[in-house]
Amino acid sequence: MTQNAPDHAPDAPVSADATNSAPPSPRLDRPGAVAGEGADAGVAAHYGDPMREQRLLSEGLAVVDLSHRGLVRVTGPDRLSWLHSLTSQHLLGLAPRTSRESLILSPKGHIEHALHVVDDGESTWLGVEPGTAGAVVEWLDRMRFMLRVEVADVTDEFATLGEPHATESLPGEPLAWVDPWPGPVGDTAEYSDATPHPGADRPWREVFVPRDRLTQVVADRPLAGTWAAEALRVHAWRPRLGAETDHRTIAHELDWLRTAVHLHKGCYRGQETIARVHNLGRPPRRLVFLHLDGSGHVLPPAGTPLLLDGRAVGRLTTVARHHEEGPIALGVVKRNTPADAVLDAPSDAGHTAAAQTVVVTP
């Protein structure tokens, strides 16, 4: 069967449309490597057998080339207090080699950037979506004022590797960011009632290595492409900037508070929206997990509208084929969409039925 690349929605923010400035990956020279597209251009979507790669990844045996991702380094004695004041997560006193996730929000509380944060005791490292490191550096530089911080885009110097492990890196090892999903982390809120949460079965970390050591670090470990990593992410209900987000997404819609937002850390840009929606109501849209009808050879692409009785109620955001569940997807729909309704995803592939599993409760 033909698999659609897990593409990103056409109305996504800068991470989906920005040109990837990272150098092309040497892993694309591997036999069978098929280059990714869209936000994941520049690395391999797969190496010839996506299902086998996905099984190896889920078993903790494979590694994923994420060298297209951006990396920002912040130095200076004020770095953690400064980032704490600007972003959504509590970062004061962050211990070396302890991972956090934080969001940069617009003044109206819309998600602009997602930061994979880990400090090594001398610098704070921010993993960001492909093609966005320059925009993150530019915005942070405007916020420096008189503080003792320096910000640099080090994407050309360091590459990222994804591994199915949940242990923080130790001194002497390459620095790694451990994904806190599904948390919860700190003083926050959960918008899903799922117990257990499917994300608990997806250990994940991103290791930052010098680009000239990338081949050495990968060594003889099996490689999995981004299709495999995206399928496991979708199965874990894990949102991704530029895929599940658009220009008006707020964190509540994606249940992203659980790992990226501290509710009582003080003022930061967009904090009023976070507090107001949490205290006074529910978000206008909600993330859903979808099982897709796999009887056709081609699946509808990301961005396909989701219809109920012929009326648009949302859109597909990421589409994947899971090695056990088959065709699956994440989507964002209007909050009042009936949770038991089977939705229709019309595309050039025909009409595809999409059965909902509630992620963010309506």
Image: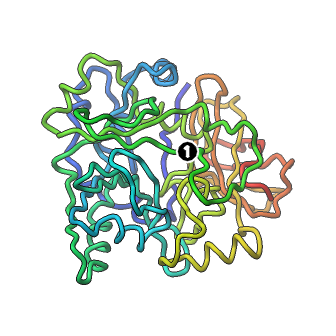
What residue sits right under mark 1 in the picture? 181
Q: Quadrant of the N terminus?
A: top right
Point 21% across, 65% down: residue: 76
Residue 287: x, y in percent?
Answer: 68, 54
Question: Relative to 323, is 190 above or below?
Answer: below
Residue 56: x, y in percent?
Answer: 46, 19
Residue 352 picture quarter:
top right
Point 63% across, 42% down: residue: 329
Residue 201: x, y in percent?
Answer: 60, 31
224 sits to left or right of 58: left
Residue 48 picture quarter:
top left
Residue 270: x, y in percent?
Answer: 53, 77
Q: In the rendered image, is residue 103 in sight?
A: yes
123 sits to left or right of 253: left
197 sits to left or right of 157: right
Residue 331 or residue 75, whichever sits in front: 75
Q: Quadrant of the C terminus?
A: bottom right
Dot 1: few (<14), some (14–19), or many (≥20) neighbours within 10 Å?
many
Point 31% across, 68% down: residue: 135
Question: Relative to 24, is 90 above or below?
Answer: below
133 sits to left or right of 14: left
Question: Relative to 336, is 109 above or below?
Answer: below
Q: In the rendered image, is residue 43 in sight?
A: no
Point 55% across, 80% down: residue: 108
Question: Relative to 39, is 264 above or below?
Answer: below
Residue 183 or residue 24, whichever sits in front: 183
- Amino acid type of disc 1? Trp
Colour convention of the picture: rainbow
Residue 219 picture quarter:
top left
Q: How many marks on residues?
A: 1
Which secondary structure, mark 1?
loop
